[in-house]
Image: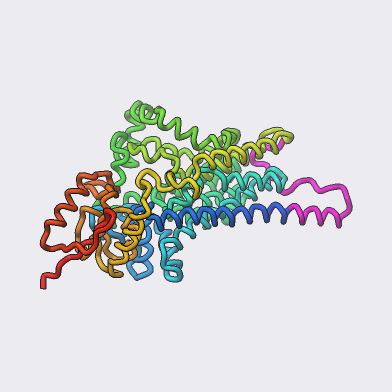
Amino acid sequence: MPGVMDTVDSAAPPRDGPALRRAVAWSTVHGWGLVVSGAMVAWSAVLFESVRNDYESFRVGRFDLGNMVQAVWSTAHGRPLDVTLVDGDQAARLASHVDPILVLLAPLWIVAPSPLALGAAQIAVVALGALPVYWLGRRHLGSERLAALLALAYLAYPWLTWNAVDAIHPATLAVPLFLYCVHFLDADRPLAAVPFAVLVLTTGELMGASVAALGIWYALARRRRLAGLALAALGVGWTIIAVYVVVPAFGDGSSPFFGYYASVGGSPAGVVRTALTDPGTIASTLLTGRLLLYLVALGAPLVGLFVLAPGLAAVALPQLLASGLSDSEVMTEPRHHYTAAAIPFLVAATVLGIVRLPEARRAFAATLVLAASVALSLAVGAWPFAVEENGFWYAAPVSHARVEALRSATRLVPEGAAVTSTNKAGSHLSARRYVFTVPVLGRSQWIVLDTADPFVSTPGSPVLARRPDVLRAFRRRIERSPRWERVYDRAGVLVFRRISSR
C-alpha cells in the first residue's frame, strides 16, 4: 500500500494494444476532467444566483461587502484601499486588516463596476480550487474517477459554499490558493508553490501562521528542510510585520480586532505569553462545547478521513486555534469566512488519508465523502433555495415592499455624495469616497435609514452591533433637526437630505 507521500501518476494501463490504451486514456482523462470542469461552471453559476438574489434583495450589508467595494473602488480611483471605518474615520484598510490582494480586483472594477462583479470573481476563484484537489487525487489514487469524486466533494463541502457566497472576503480567496500550494509542494515543486504562498499572505495578516505551518509540514513530509523552513520563515515574518508594523503605521495603534482575544492575552504576543505563563486559561478557553461542535461541523462532510493524514491536517491548527481562542462566537460559526485557512488542509488531508486505506476500500471512501458532503450541503449549504439562511445572522428576510423602497431610496442619493446609511442599504452605496454607518454623520449630505435594520456603529468596536435603541434615537434626532429634511418615506425606509446653510 503506498504511503501518504508516495506519488502515483495514473492508473495502471490496460493490457490491450497501444491504440486502445491511448483511446482509453484519452476518454478517461478528458471525460472525468470535463466532469470536474463542468461542475465548476455549474457550481459557480448556481452560487452566483444566490449572491445576486441576496444583493438585489438587500440581504447583505455594507459590512462586509460594501467595505470591500469601497476599498476596491478607491483603489481604482487612485486612493489605494481607502475606506470609511466603522467609527467614521477615513483610513487605508490596512489600518485594520492587511489584505492587499484587494488591489488586484481594481482592474475588474474598472471593466465591470458592480459589487456583483466582485462576488462573481470570488466564486470563480474558489471554484478553481477543485483542480488541485483533482490533481492531488489523480496523483495519489491513480484513478481519474476517484480524483473527480473528491474534487466534486470539495465543491459540495457546505462550508465552502458559505465562504463563496459571503461576498466578499479576501480570506476566502486563500482557500484555492492554499490548495495550489499543497499540490505543488506535494509534487516537490516548491518554487511553483511560492507565488501562490505569496498571494495567500496578501489575503490577511494572520495567514502567515498557516503558511508557516505548511512550510513545516513540507520540511518534515518531504525532508526538504531548507525549502520548508524558508517557507515557514516567510509566513512568520509576514505576520509579525503585518501585525506589528503595517497595522500601527496605517492606524492609531494595534489592531482593533485584538479585542477578540482579550481573555487570553489581547494580541498574538499576548496569547503566546498566556500560553507560557497560564496554560490553564488557554486550555479552559479551548475545551468548550462550542469548539467541539465547530470541529464536528467541519469534519462531518469529510467523514473525518483527514485524520489518516494527520501531518497535513495539522496545518489547519493555526486557524482552528485562532477561532477557538477568540471571545467572539462568530469565529466558531462554520458559515463564516474564518474557516478559510482550515478547509483546504482538511480537504487535501482527506485525499491523502484515503490513500492509506486498502485499495479495495478507496472507491467506497471517496464515494462516501462525496455523499456526505452533498447531503450536508443540501441541508445547511448556501444554495438559492435556502433563502432563510443565505443572509447569515445579520440579515432577516426583507419583504418585497421594503426591497422596492430600499431600491428607490438608494437611487435618490447622487453618485459620489457623502452618505450615512443603515447596514444593508450601505451595501448599495459604498462605491464612493465617504459612506458612514448610523449613527455616524461625518460629512454626510444624505441619510438612508431602514428602520428594520438595527445594526449600527458603536464606540470602540470594529464591527457593528445590534442596537435598535440607537437606531430609534438617531431617527428622532434627525427628524427634529432643522438641518435635515425628509425627502422619502415608504415601508419603513426614510431618506433625508441636508439643508444647505446658504
In the image: residue 493, left or right of residue 169: left
* Residue 347 visible: yes
* Quadrant (top left, top right, bottom left, bottom right) of the C terminus: bottom left
Looking at the image, is 199 positioned above or below residue 375? below
In the image: residue 478, left or right of residue 344: left
Instruction: Give the percent coordinates (x, y) of residue 111.
Output: 45, 71
Magenta residues?
A: 1-28
Looking at the image, is 30 positioned above or below residue 366? below
Q: What residue is rendered at 27% in x and 45% in y?
A: 465
In the image: residue 387, left or right of residue 97: right
Q: In the rendered picture of this protein, how many numbered marks are placed on residues? A: 0
Instruction: Give the percent coordinates (x, y) of residue 481.
Output: 12, 59
* Residue 219 visible: no
Instruction: Give the percent coordinates (x, y) of residue 53.
Output: 45, 55
Looking at the image, is 188 positioned above or below residue 100? above
Predominant secondary structure, magenta span: loop
Instruction: Give the percent coordinates (x, y) of residue 258.
Output: 30, 43
**25 magenta-colored:** yes
In the image: residue 136, left or right of residue 219: right
Q: What residue is rendered at 41% in x and 28% in y?
A: 289
Looking at the image, is 500 positioned above or below residue 224? below
**Which residue sits furthest right?**
17
